[in-house]
Amino acid sequence: MHPILVNEPGKKVLVLGNEAITRAAIEAGVTVAATYPGTPSSEIGNTMHKVAKEAGIYFEFSTNEKVAFETAAAAAVAGVRAFSFMKHVGLNVAADAFMTLAYTGVRAGYVVLTADDPSCHSSQNEQDNRFFAKMSGVPMVEPSSPEEARQLMHYAFELSEKFQMPVLFRTTTRMNHVRGIIELGKIRKPSGRVHFEKDPGRFVTVPANARKRHLALLEIILEMEKESEVSPFNRVIAPEKMNTAGSLKLGIITSGVSYNYVMEVLNNIEMDVEARVLKLGMTNPLPDDMISEFSSECDLVLTVEEGEMYLEEYVKAVLKERDVPTVVLGKRDGHFPRPMEYNPDIVARGIRSALEGEGRSIELPLKENIEWETLPEPPRPPVLCAGCPHRATFLAVRRATKGKAVYPNDIGCYTLGIQPPQSTGDLLICMGSSSGSAGGLSRVVDEPVVAFIGDSTFFHSGIPPLVNAVHNKHRFVLNIMDNATTAMTGHQPHPGLPIDGMGDEAPAISIEKLCRGVGVEFVRTVNPLNVKETQKAFEEALAHDGVSVVITRSPCALKLERELRKRNIVRTKYQVYQDKCTRCDTCTKIFACPAFYKIGDEHYIDPDMCWSCGVCVQVCPFGAMGPVKKEKGGE
């Protein structure tokens, strides 16, 4: 039995935040779960993939987030508990369905997790998805720890069924990836198959029905506002270190991970104030009465939140409307930064800034051995792995185009083509945008256009723009970089592979047939580790009058190496033959595999990093690289 399935209520275990969320969904009796993998939510799907069959859950890695949302939503409408999850930008893809489901609602519990990514650790923006809850009208909860995430998941399903609404479960990177202790709850058995009760007046959103459902939603929101006032996850907390003699009463309103930073600061510094915290776990709708009552008892209120001014603007509006004179400070006043993740030091500085603005003196930190500031980390830009087939593809494209082309890129490992010496990233908007933007570029630029997209991203959202390009007679080369996995998010399967989210055998969808099926006349498949063959394919594609597709197919080096190790297969390593090396730096400056290194002017290949792709042999113009030779007299 997988550890996440142990049915021992009361047992305490140390887990990752995403594992706590997975466990909570299983405890809650989820029957259907679906996702498109995306950091920082990926481990939820990875864990579901391992345990779904044993847990009696249907789970799938869907082609994109909209499909994942619709799959789970349909199950919840039918009457079984469902769960879909995605990174923050994934909710953009699912937004069309998400906004309408707020009108129709659901019959059984449906929780939608959005994992926001402050500081853009693995994303193209810092989008704050709390506004999706406000815009749609659906209730939202935000956990601050793995155990609270487990508890809030149960609460979210109860909310969903009480109001027959989907519930937005908002996390951030630190919440997803922190480790903490949870107390296991009892596992509820998933539902079996159910009879579908027809109700087209509710679930078919033609305009006449949609107008009625909007009115129904507004009534539900009023009831949810009452729930927020009594929610056990919205509560006032006093720090352990209380200065009741303080001459200024400070209130802090916060939620999610920011709450942890606030409490760490308040419990480790001394201030001439009396501080209390309003911790919000249900953050849509927000509790107006609780906020105004809490604030009216304070001389100064600070809102501490990562992302946008969601809490700050709401609190100010409520107090203004209710004539509560308490001063509210936050991001707008410059005390707390608007971008990036927070940490205790940032929060401490923000509190000090606000208090000094109110004429209060505060030294931070005041307690011995409290040091939040850390030395800046040395820069370590991300690079393609040694042996990655994408590096060879970029080299072949650069040679075929002589570097004189425009390169729309996409979301995946190959995004790293933006780095020199590959320098094959000129435009990146979102998932699937490379082929869409390539069409527009091809209509207005003089240079040839070569777009890059991964196999998983192609299935996610690369097919419609390819259809568009064929129909509208655009002219560009689309390189589908097929490394047989969803590599960047942890090697999850996709429709091009013969395995599904349940781990069962599944029909693999042919990329070649798909491309030809939508009308692409030029389709070539090559092994990018053969640089000359790949270069020739791109040269022919560039000469084609119309949309052309080159599929570069070679497995992800990390995945391949893992599989070979399981089978105890040791591949030949490569080395630099010093007697032939001319120190021309082609290997380090043109190809730049991270396995290369220099000592003085001499070039070497790190045997622990070499994954035997053999491309270096093709790159070196002087034949100075090849298989490792045994030294004379060696064993």
Image (cartoon, grey):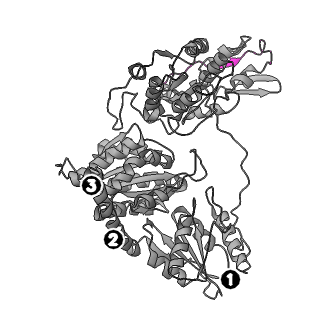
Question: What element does badge 1 sit on?
Answer: loop
The residue singled out by tag 3 in the image is 209
The residue singled out by tag 2 in the image is 223
Q: Quadrant location of residue 531?
A: top right
- Is residue 80 visible from the viewing direction of this image? no
Q: Quadrant location of residue 217?
A: bottom left
Circles 3 and 1: CB atoms closer than 8 Å: no
Mark 1 is surrounded, within 10 Å at the Cα level, by few (under 14), some (14 to 19) or many (20 or more) other residues, namely some
Disc 3 to disc 1, how far (Cα)?
58 Å
Front residue of 302/134: it is 134
Expressed as whole percent of the image width and height from the top left, the position of residue 563 reads 47, 27
Magenta: main secondary structure: loop
Q: Is residue 305 left or right of residue 514?
A: right
- Residue at 23 percent across and 53 percent down: it is 79
Instruction: Choose the circle earlier in sequence order: 3 or 1.
Output: 3
Q: In this rendering, is residue 296 above or below 111?
A: below
Question: What element does badge 2 sit on?
Answer: helix
Expressed as whole percent of the image width and height from the top left, the position of residue 357 reads 72, 76
Nearer to us of marks 3 and 1 is 3
Mark 2 is surrounded, within 10 Å at the Cα level, by few (under 14), some (14 to 19) or many (20 or more) other residues, namely few
Give the residue type at disc 1: Asp
Q: Which residues are magenta?
A: 568-583
Residue 272: which disc? 1
Expressed as whole percent of the image width and height from the top left, the position of residue 287 reads 44, 73
